[in-house]
Amino acid sequence: MDISNIHYSTNCQSCGYIVEITQDIIREEGVECDACGRHISLWELPDKTLVKKIMEIRKNELYVLWEQKKREYDEFSKALQDLKNKLDCLNYPYEFILLRQSRKEDLQDRIAALEPQVAAIKCTTEDIYNHYAGIKNRLNRL
């Protein structure tokens, strides 16, 4: 969600400095006060209605990001499984007798290159979803 036309601000509870809440601050779920350097957590703002509005924005942003990463993970997983299936076909002794060993090695190299990418995307996807679920649970308790 674009908050460029919405203006949220809060006061630092240490020094009273007014801090404008931007998209970057929402993404980080907090900010350092420019005046005194104290960390201002969006969860600890006194106006719980503002906290809910802001964190709903963050929750929705994470959900969209999770959906994108999930699609990316599904695509990479499918590509990896297709390569593994092709390699399995080459392992049958009675099929593809005329295929060279280089074809098999090529598939093994492509699988080896793709497996870490799939694992990394899976890990990122799970982290994003866990963060989303954490925000959702915390919002439900407010």
Image: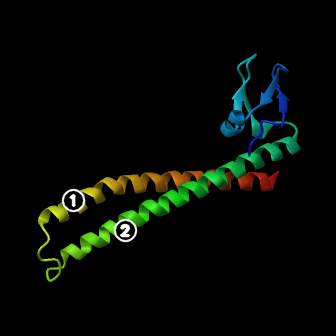
Q: Which mark is residue 15?
A: none
User: Which quadrant of the view contains residue 90?
Assistant: bottom left
- Of residues 82 and 55, the one nearer the viewer is 82
Label 2 and label 1: CA atoms lie apart by: 15 Å
Q: Which mark is residue 106?
A: 1
Secondary structure at numbered mark 2 = helix
**Type of residue at label 1?**
Asp
Which residue of the protein is positioned furthest toward the top in this rendering? 35
Query: Which residue is tagged 2?
Result: 81
Residue displayed at 70% across by 29% down: 31
Which residue of the protein is positioned furthest toward the front in this rendering? 98
Could you tell me how many numbered marks the image carries?
A: 2
**Type of residue at label 2?**
Gln
User: Which quadrant of the view contains residue 32?
Assistant: top right
Residue displayed at 80% across by 28% down: 20
Q: Residue 64 appears at what percent x and percent y?
A: 65, 54
State whether residue 81 is above or below residue 8.
below
Q: Is residue 112 left or right of residue 50?
A: left
Q: Residue 111 appears at what percent x and percent y?
A: 30, 60
User: Which quadrant of the view contains residue 110?
Assistant: bottom left
Which one is in front in this view, the residue at disc 2 or the one at disc 1?
A: 1
- Of residues 104 and 30, the one nearer the viewer is 104
Q: Residue 73 appears at what percent x and percent y?
A: 48, 59
Rate crowding at label 1 as few (under 14), some (14 to 19) or many (20 or more) other CA atoms within 10 Å.
few
